[in-house]
Amino acid sequence: MGSNQLAGSLYVSHLLSMWNARGFEFGAVLFLATVYPGTLLPMSIYALVRALAAISLSPTVGKFIDSNNRLSTIRISILGQRASVAASCAVFALLYQAKEALSRHVQTLLLVVLIVFACVEKLCSIMNTVAVERDWVVVIAGDDDLMLRRLNAQMRRIDLFCKLVSPLSIALLHGWSPRVAVWSTLVTNALSVSIEYFLIARVFHQVPALADRDDSSQIGGQDHGEVDQSSRESQPESRSRFARCGGFIIESARIYVRQTAFLPSLALSVLYLTVLSFSGQMTTYLLALPSPKITSTTVGLLRTASAISEISSTFLAPRVMSRIGPVRAGIWFLSWQILWLTSAVGVLWIGFSGSAYTVTAIFVAGVIMSRIGLWSFDLCAQLIIQESITASHRGSFSSVEMSVQNFFELCTFATTIVFPKPAQFRYPAIISLVAVYLSAALYAKFVRDRRGHLLHMPTCLKISRDRDGYRYQSLSAEEQ
């Protein structure tokens, strides 16, 4: 199998995984709103428990990824995701059909079942994403930095495409018929499982290095093995399963903090504390504006423009990184994001007398343009992490990173709980802006520690290598 066929199999498998995950994530909200109209309590409990499961159990998932066969891990994640989604859709269909005939206790029990399935789906989704994006693509690329950047960009492009189109498809189907939306979600997941199962196995068998778990565990793994051994000797065999789970979490957290990519990872995670995206909070704010009056259609068009901006970053970032390296590129992309978001949040606080339209236009434009910097920085940070983390720690590190990201995402909801009125949106907005500045400060410390300086302007044309070993090409005096 050629490299193009190999990449194609990986991309199609990832497309199906992301399409189903993004579609169900959004569809579940619509399904719950249909089953429980007039109240946000069931949806809030559903989302909260799902997020808490991701925060608390992701380290255990990472430990599982690092200690098991790669193909088996991916297959478990595929089967877990598809089975939990199909079971959830079956429960939703039952509630649609016979909710009035069910007692209150049975309805509560079914909601608990839905929440359990949601937690399983979330954890299996994390397992699949971490294993593929942080481990498989690194092994497949090998020593080819250009191929790694190309794989990263294409995988992120697929994710952003599914993030836009899959929820839109579910929304259109739900608008036509909620029952059709539920059954189509179930059928799509049932049909895709065998295709994903086959394609990911095809990739695995064509890349011998993926089967070589023993060698990968030896990379920088002596200390890790000694830590594992000492941990087993120092703790009694009769300890409870809960204690073992707690031990995994503590061990994974220590691995996360001690890695050289800790600061870039933390800087990226802090960016999840934001209401400055076309998510529920900002959409609610825009729809509630008295002037100018924004319709749901307008919000949909603005969200599409934001998605195009995000996808463009997957073409821009690899080009910039190939010239100046991911470490330096990260500074520039974070600066871009700060520039636009400072303008966006600034107009919410300063405003322009008698020009609500201008304020809204600048705010929305600033948010849309900032997405280029956000997702470009995401690719820079991901490449730094992939190249810095030893193979034996990839799962543990990335799963803890996802826990931290989910924590900051929960903090985002907390800001709108404290400031729930649309007129108070500028307060969550300024908190989000502070988070971006904090992210920049953390990343600046990483760059300073690693390079000895923050910014370095090249003075010659020839292609050379910076202190991190990345190739870049500077401009000649004539071209400048």
Image (cartoon, rainbow, N blue to C red):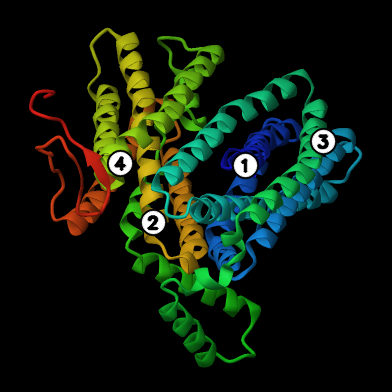
Dots 2, 3 in contact, CB < 8 A: no
Name the quadrant of the C terminus.
Answer: top left
Q: Mark 1 points at which residue?
A: 14
Name the side, left or right, on which 223 lies relative to 192. left
Circle 3: element type:
helix
Residue mark closest to the camera, 3 vs 1:
1
Kind of residue indicated by mark 3: Val
Tag 1: Cα neighbours inside 10 Å, few (<14), some, or many (≥20)? many
Residue mark closest to the camera, 2 vs 3:
2
Residue displayed at 82% across by 26% down: 180
Dots 3, 1 in contact, CB < 8 A: no
Residue mark closest to the camera, 1 vs 4:
1
Residue 331 visible at all: no
Tag 3: Cα neighbours inside 10 Å, few (<14), some, or many (≥20)? few
Kind of residue indicated by mark 1: His
Name the quadrant of the N terminus.
Answer: top right
First in sequence, mark 2 or 1: give its number. Answer: 1
Q: Name the residue under label 3.
A: 187
Count of marks overlaid on the render: 4
Above or below — where is 62 with respect to 144? below
Residue 471 visible at all: yes
| Residue 317 position by quadrant | top left
First in sequence, mark 3 or 1: give its number. Answer: 1
Closer to the camera in the image, 162 or 8 = 8
> In x, y percent, where is residue 380?
35, 44
Q: Name the residue under label 4.
A: 436
Q: Mark 2 points at which residue?
A: 387
